[in-house]
Image (tube, helix red, strand yellow):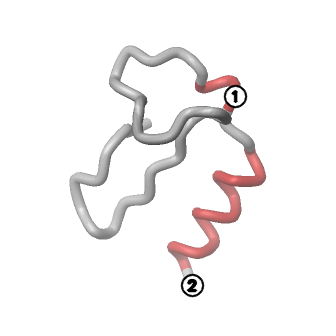
Amino acid sequence: MTYGKYSSLMEVIEPVGEKNTTVHDTLGSDKISFDEVLAKSNSMLN
């Protein structure tokens, strides 16, 4: 998981309720929606 855009080909997915506040030791990966990951993955593939 990454918390920043190191490339224009990357998308950031943050835990619910977090916006631009995550760092590498931020807990909350269990608060990331599968549907959001799937939607961003599909948009990157299309």
Question: Which one is in front, 46 or 28?
Answer: 28
Whole-number angstrom distance, CA of label 2 to CA of label 1: 26 Å
Q: Which residue is mark 2?
A: 46
5 up-or-down from 45: above or below: above
Q: Quadrant of residue 34?
A: top right
Secondary-structure class at tag 1: helix
Q: List the residue tagged with mark 1.
A: 31
Instruction: Inspect the image, locate mark 1, and give the three-letter code of the amino acid beneath it.
Output: Lys
Q: Secondary structure at mark 2?
A: loop
Q: Amino acid at mark 2?
A: Asn
The answer to whether mark 2 and mark 1 are in CB contact below 8 A is no
Is residue 41 found left or right of 8 in the rendered image?
right
Quarter of the image with the C terminus is bottom right
**Count of numbered tags:** 2
> Which quadrant of the figure contains the N terminus?
top left
Q: Residues within 10 Å of mark 2 (few under 14, many from 20)?
A: few
Residue 37 screen position, x and y as percent: 64, 52
Image location (x, y in percent) of residue 21: 41, 31
Out of 22 and 9, give the one closest to the viewer.
22
Q: Height in image: 17 above or below 34?
A: above
Judge depth for marks 2 and 1 and give the one in front.
Answer: 1
- Name the residue at 69% across, 53% down: 36
- Furthest-left residue in this view: 6
Precedes in sequence: disc 2 or disc 1: 1
Q: Residue at x 44, y 58 (%)?
A: 11
